[in-house]
């Protein structure tokens, strides 16, 4: 009867151990990096009262009859599931997302921990802030960080370019004057009557008609009767006497012919009849309206045949030339009709001989005269033609007959700058000037303030682009500069890849070219530290540079559950933990290093309380077994 006492006693001990495990888990529910434990029970060996027997003959087999002797605590193992991240914001508060432990050395042995509450001591050693144990790097060695070191300077060796040089050309341009209208040669409007003379006007009557010449004001023509009939010449003489801008003459058939003094399409004759029965228009057989014709003039066209001509020039008539050449030099000359020439081409040649810094040309396709500066840039070009005073010949010149159609401008220029560094780490401002050439290409020139240095070779000529805006040539170049007394420094210019859009471009949009990168820098001091996911510690310096200044070693074991708790959240290896591998995070199964956070305990409080209830009930039940057994023994004693 004592078997139940022994079994119940063992169960009390096992459940008490379970409660101890649960209590420890709950006590460490807020311990960073703590891994909760669990208790595993196993039954004790059993007393075999009857072994199992096989079937024989007509009798079946029997199962063994065994009586258990209780329970025992078989194992207490560690749960290694991931704890939550508690963000702290400290650079060297770290946790591991995944397998692995941080490695530390207490001066005697190497210990391991999931708690990454690290920092620097007075000499820059990386230590565990809780104990002062030194942290090991990926090579298994304690390490320190030099927070006062200077990152050495580096001279600029390359400059990269990007952005747009505009396709639209605003310079360089040569100034150009163009005649405000094309020159035309034309035929005058000529109206021929159908009636031939002599013409009879009844005695005492006056016959009338109205002429409108070249779109001008109406002119009245009235012819009175004479004793004898009027000849065609008599009629022509009276029309000439009473009107302007028209010449009346007698045609080959004896008819009256009206010819406008103008030529071309601007030359028109309109005739309005007089009163019925006394209509001079009908008497002469004139039509209602007629217009002249014109074509683009040629160099051989006589000045008198131009549509701008109002009245013919005679030999000796003068065209006054007045203007200024490119640099403002006055141009004053007299073109004598019949002496210097009488055609449009000869007038152009005369002008060309007077403008020494420009080219005067006649375009037979457009009929325009142009005066174009021989050089690009701002210019003072001007030209005016006027007729000599007191002469019969004249044309419709005006002071604005020649107007500027292209303003002279200097080349398109775009200026940018970039900070570069010499070998001593001193910064300098290097200016870049892009200048468009007359053939559309660009030249790049580099300059330095005289107080900072000298540009030995700093010009890149002939930068050209494809039709799609990508750079064609060149894609790279070299310049040479000298800063003060330092040795000359060669700098490569990376302008882009031919046919690609990774450097300079030329699109139809405004300039946006920049020197967007260069590889030089000055001396820098440590500004801040950061930790990469593999445990590498990066130092960020005031010169924009970054370098590795240390690393955290991450240890992994074949069997992390085989590690032995050392106290203070440290572990040490045992014979069953397996071989250690120490290296970087995210390699060989090691987890990711997360900076600025600590791993929380993985204890689930709710789960632990459920287990606590289970352990309590188990303990109570076994205590009840002892009570019942005690009562039974008391009954036995009472029988005696």
Image (spheres, rainbow, N blue to C red):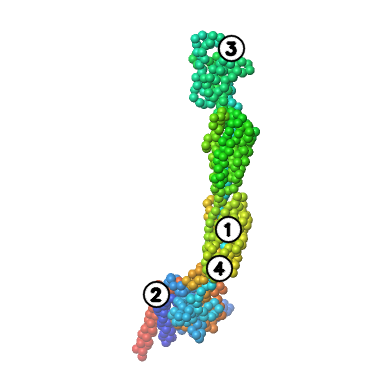
The reply to whether residue 65 is visible in this rendering is no
Query: Which residue occupies 60% across, 65% down?
Result: 490
SS of the residue under disc 1: strand
SS of the residue under disc 3: loop
- Residue denoted by label 1: 445
Question: Mark 1 near mark 4, Cβ–Cβ under 8 Å?
Answer: no
User: Which of 111/398 is in front?
Assistant: 398
SS of the residue under disc 4: loop
Query: Which residue occupies 41% across, 75% down?
Result: 30
Disc 4 from disc 2: Cα separation: 78 Å
Instruction: Give the farthest residue toward the left.
Output: 638
- Residue denoted by label 2: 609
Q: Which mark is residue 484?
A: 4
* Figure quadrant of the C terminus: bottom left
* Figure quadrant of the N terminus: bottom left
Q: Residues within 10 Å of mark 1 (few under 14, many from 20)?
A: some
Mark sitting earlier along the chain (3/4): 3
The image shows residue 80 at horizontal and vertical percentages of 48, 75
């Amino acid at each position: 009867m004592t078997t139940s006492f022994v079994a119940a006693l063992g169960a009390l001990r096992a459940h008490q151990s379970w409660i101890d495990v649960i209590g420890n888990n709950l006590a460490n529910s807020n311990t960073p990096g703590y891994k909760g434990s669990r208790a595993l029970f196993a039954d004790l060996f059993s007393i075999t009262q009857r072994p199992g027997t096989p079937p024989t003959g007509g009798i079946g087999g029997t199962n063994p009859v065994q009586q258990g002797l209780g329970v025992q605590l078989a194992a207490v193992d560690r749960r290694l599931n991931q704890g939550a991240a508690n963000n702290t914001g400290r650079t060297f508060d770290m946790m591991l997302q995944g397998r692995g432990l941080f490695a530390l050395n207490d001066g005697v042995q190497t210990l391991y921990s999931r708690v990454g509450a690290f920092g620097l001591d007075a000499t820059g050693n990386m230590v565990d802030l809780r104990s002062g144990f030194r942290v090991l790097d990926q090579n298994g060695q304690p390490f320190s960080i030099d927070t006062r070191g200077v990152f050495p300077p580096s001279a600029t060796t390359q400059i990269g370019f990007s952005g747009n040089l505009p396709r639209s050309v605003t310079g360089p341009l040569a100034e150009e004057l163009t005649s405000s209208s094309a020159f035309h040669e034309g035929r005058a409007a000529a109206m021929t009557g159908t009636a031939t003379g002599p013409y009879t006007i009844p005695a005492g009557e006056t016959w009338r008609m109205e002429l409108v010449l070249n779109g001008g004001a109406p002119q009245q023509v009235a012819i009175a009767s004479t004793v004898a009939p009027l000849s065609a010449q008599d009629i022509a003489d009276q029309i000439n006497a009473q009107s302007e801008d028209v010449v009346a003459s007698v045609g080959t058939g004896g008819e009256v012919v009206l010819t406008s003094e103008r030529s071309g399409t601007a030359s028109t004759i309109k005739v309005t009849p007089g009163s019925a029965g006394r209509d001079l228009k009908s008497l002469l057989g004139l039509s209602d309206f007629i217009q002249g014709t014109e074509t683009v003039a040629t160099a051989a066209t006589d000045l008198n045949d131009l549509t701008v001509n109002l009245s013919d020039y005679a030999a000796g008539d003068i065209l006054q030339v007045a203007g200024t050449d490119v640099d403002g030099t006055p141009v004053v000359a007299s073109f004598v009709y019949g002496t210097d020439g009488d055609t449009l081409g000869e007038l152009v040649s005369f002008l060309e001989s007077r403008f020494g810094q420009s080219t005067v040309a006649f375009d037979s396709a457009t009929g325009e005269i142009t005066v174009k500066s021989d050089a690009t840039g701002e210019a003072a070009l001007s030209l005016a033609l006027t007729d000599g005073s007191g002469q019969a010949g004249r044309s419709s010149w005006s002071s604005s007959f020649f107007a500027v159609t292209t303003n002279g401008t200097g080349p398109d220029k775009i200026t940018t700058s970039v900070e570069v560094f010499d070998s001593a780490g001193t910064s300098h401002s290097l200016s870049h000037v892009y200048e468009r050439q007359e053939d559309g290409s660009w030249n790049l020139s580099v300059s330095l303030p005289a107080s900072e240095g000298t540009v030995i070779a700093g010009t890149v000529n002939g930068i050209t682009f494809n039709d799609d805006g990508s750079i064609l040539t060149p894609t790279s170049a070299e310049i040479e500069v000298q800063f003060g007394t330092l040795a000359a420094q060669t700098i490569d210019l990376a302008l882009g890849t031919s046919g690609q859009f990774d450097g300079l471009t030329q699109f139809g949009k405004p300039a946006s070219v920049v020197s967007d990168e260069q590889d030089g820098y000055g001396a820098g001091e440590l500004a801040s530290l950061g930790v990469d996911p593999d445990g590498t510690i990066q130092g960020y310096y005031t010169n924009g540079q970054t370098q590795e200044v240390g690393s955290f070693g991450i240890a992994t074991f074949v069997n992390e559950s085989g590690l032995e708790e050392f106290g203070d959240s440290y572990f040490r290896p045992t014979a069953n933990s397996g071989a250690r591998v120490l290296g970087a995070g995210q390699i060989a199964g090691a987890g990711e290093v997360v900076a600025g956070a600590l791993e929380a305990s993985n204890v689930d409080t709710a789960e632990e309380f459920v287990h606590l209830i289970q352990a309590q009930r188990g303990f109570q039940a076994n205590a009840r077994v002892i009570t019942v057994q005690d009562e039974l023994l008391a009954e036995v004693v009472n029988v005696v």
